[in-house]
Image (spheres, grey):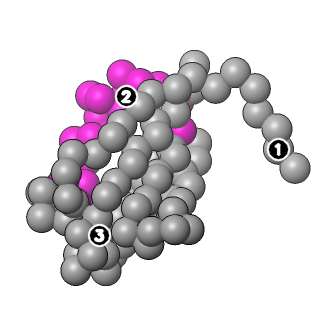
Amino acid sequence: MAITYVIKFNVRPEQRGAFLTLLDGVLDQMRHEPMFHEAVLHQNPEDQNRFMLYETWENHEDVLQVQLHRSYRKAWHDALPTLLTGERDISIWQPLRALLR
């Protein structure tokens, strides 16, 4: 069953550009993974340094055992402590119903 991750980030204002550049690289690579479904990056309209990433994958174990260890994620993961004001807020959800246009 598919699994969705909602990840919230508070980015240091001076690191906003680096955050987006590194995340864009990860997102561009993720789209080619066979277990990947979708991802949407959101920005808080009241604070340009707060972001939410919504991503859905086919299998939670694959994310933990394979996807998180992909080489294209290394620079992103290594940079997070300098990019963010604190820890990411990560929650996990299971889709029950989808409405597509």
- Position of residue 34 in the picture relative to residue 22 (left or right): right
Q: Secondary structure at mark 1?
A: loop
For the image, the number of numbered tags is 3
Say which of marks 1 and 2 sits in front: 1
- Residue 67 lies, in percent from the top left, at 32, 40
By secondary structure, the bulk of the magenta-drawn segment is best described as helix
Q: Is residue 59 magenta?
A: yes
Residue at position x 58%, y 47% from top? 38
Question: Above or below — where is 58 with respect to 15?
Answer: above
Three-letter amino acid code of the residue under disc 1: Leu
- Residue 34 lies, in percent from the top left, at 50, 42
Three-letter amino acid code of the residue under disc 2: Asp
The quadrant holding residue 9 is bottom left
Any mark on residue 62, and which? 2
- Position of residue 25 in the picture relative to residue 92 (left or right): left
Chain-order first, disc 2 or disc 3 = 3
Disc 3: which residue: 19
Measure the C-alpha gap from mark 1 to mark 2: 25 Å
- Residue 82 lies, in percent from the top left, at 12, 64
